[in-house]
Image (cartoon, rainbow, N blue to C red):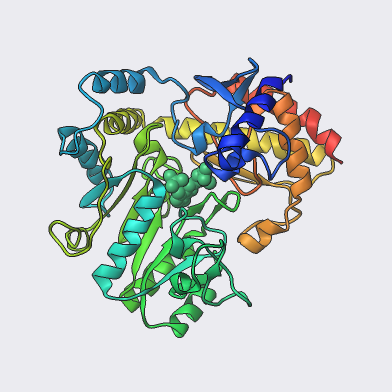
Amino acid sequence: MNTQKSKQAFDLAQNVIPGGVDSPVRAFKSVGGTPLFIERGEGAYLVDIDGNRYVDFVQSWGPLIFGHCDKTIEDAVIKAVKNGLSFGAPTEVETKLASRICDMFESIDKVRFVNSGTEAVMSAIRLARGYTGRNDILKFEGCYHGHSDSLLVQAGSGALTFGTPSSPGVPADFTKHTLLAKYNDIQSVKKSFENSNDIACIIIEPVAGNMGFIPADEEFLQELRTLCDENGTLLIFDEVMSGFRASLKGAQGISNVIPDLVTFGKVIGGGMPVGAFGGKLDIMNQLSPDGPVYQAGTLSGNPVAMEAGLASVSKIIENRDLYSSFEAKAKRLVSGFKEAANEAGISLQVNVRGSMFGFFFNDNEVKNFDDALKSDGEAFSKFHQAMLNEGFYFACSQFETGFICAAISDEIIDDCIQAAKKIMKTLK
Ligand code: KE4
């Protein structure tokens, strides 16, 4: 692939944008090589500024469940734009999208829109603290919930301690209320409750997509629910990535565990900047202006973004049989990868939930962040680069997730598996 124009564009971008990107993972630092500058999307494909076409398994990190330039979503946005871009006042489309989400999830009586997943999670955490009157929060090593200060936390010394900031600029005081536990390990959670009787909420990616792809064990989620009920702690499902992706009803549609608060993003914006958080009446009614917990946003519920989200969510609800097709394609893809790896004498761990999939270059099953860290990052990087050269665009980090969209055909899956068979042989 000739990527000369991307290289030039990246050089220019780095003069005026930190790292040349507006979000760090895009810089390809984890896999090496130059990030591709994209000119346009076409259904299942990305086209870079050098004219190279790639099958897109990233889909803007999840939002584009129908692929690029979906006509339904495009028409909705174009129509909305002609009425104006923003009013800073309520519009009926916000109510329509909120109603779709409330009708879909028994755990949600009300929902509020924001502009990103980060905002959704930050707001849900504040609401949980305001509702319970407690200060501590519990998250899991390896789960990412956006970049708000109290959630930018990794394990301190020892495995199960109060978090320490994982970024400069976050004062230790801002993370002293953040407890850490191990994903899929209920004993580590019980230990946290021994360490604190002030836990406002547990927040979890019920299908983790930010330490690579690791679904939580159903029993683990059920035990989290029980522990929260026993301790008066709220359970927050961060479904920013898994919402409308792991199933029509996200992870809670698979586990049947009902959270107290849910956060959304990505698919509910259809590619436009939308996040949301929702839950039961008694919790949501604590939010300003009805309640004392403050939360706000100039462009929250932006009518153009709302129309994109309404079109995206409505279309997926009207085509809910797509999920069985998504999952069949994802399973066929990763099974093909696993077969190709086995033929090459390489250990590959794979997993699927609905339209989400992941693979680890790892000898053993990956159940938590420690396991994920033992994966062969070099093999992943070589695979990523080689598949790019074959015209397949995967997430540029072992600690991300892949997605199937409605525009990805069975033929594309077959072609991708053939490319993987060729590439795996070169990795040994
Ligand atoms: P945003 O603020 O990026 O919209 O959402 C933060 C967020 C919250 N919760 C979960 C479960 C998430 O996956 C995310 C964001 N996901 C990453 C992909 N791993 C966004 C990509 C990026 O950071 O550029």
Which residue corresponds to the image point at 16% horizontal and 59% vertical from the top-left? 285
Quadrant location, the C terminus: top right
Which residue corresponds to the image point at 60% horizontal and 61% vertical from the top-left? 368
Looking at the image, residue 415 sits to the left or right of residue 254; the answer is right
Quarter-wise, where is residue 359 in the image? Answer: top right
Looking at this rendering, what residue extends furthest in the left direction?
290
Please say if 60 is above or below 259: above
Of 14 and 238, nearer the camera is 14
Of 223 and 35, nearer the camera is 35
Looking at the image, residue 423 sits to the left or right of residue 326; the answer is right
Residue 319 location, x and y as percent?
35, 28
Quadrant location, the N terminus: top right
Which residue corresponds to the image point at 41% horizontal and 39% vertical from the top-left? 266
Please say if 18 is above or below 296: above
Looking at this rendering, what residue extends furthest in the top direction?
51
Please say if 346 is above or below 38: below
Looking at the image, residue 86 sits to the left or right of residue 22; the answer is left
Residue 401: in sight, yes or no?
no
Looking at the image, residue 352 sits to the left or right of residue 284; the answer is right
Of 183 and 344, nearer the camera is 183
Residue 412 location, x and y as percent?
61, 22
Please say if 58 is above or below 200: above
Which residue corresponds to the image point at 12% horizontal and 58% vertical from the top-left? 290
Residue 335: in sight, yes or no?
yes
Residue 19 location, x and y as percent?
61, 42
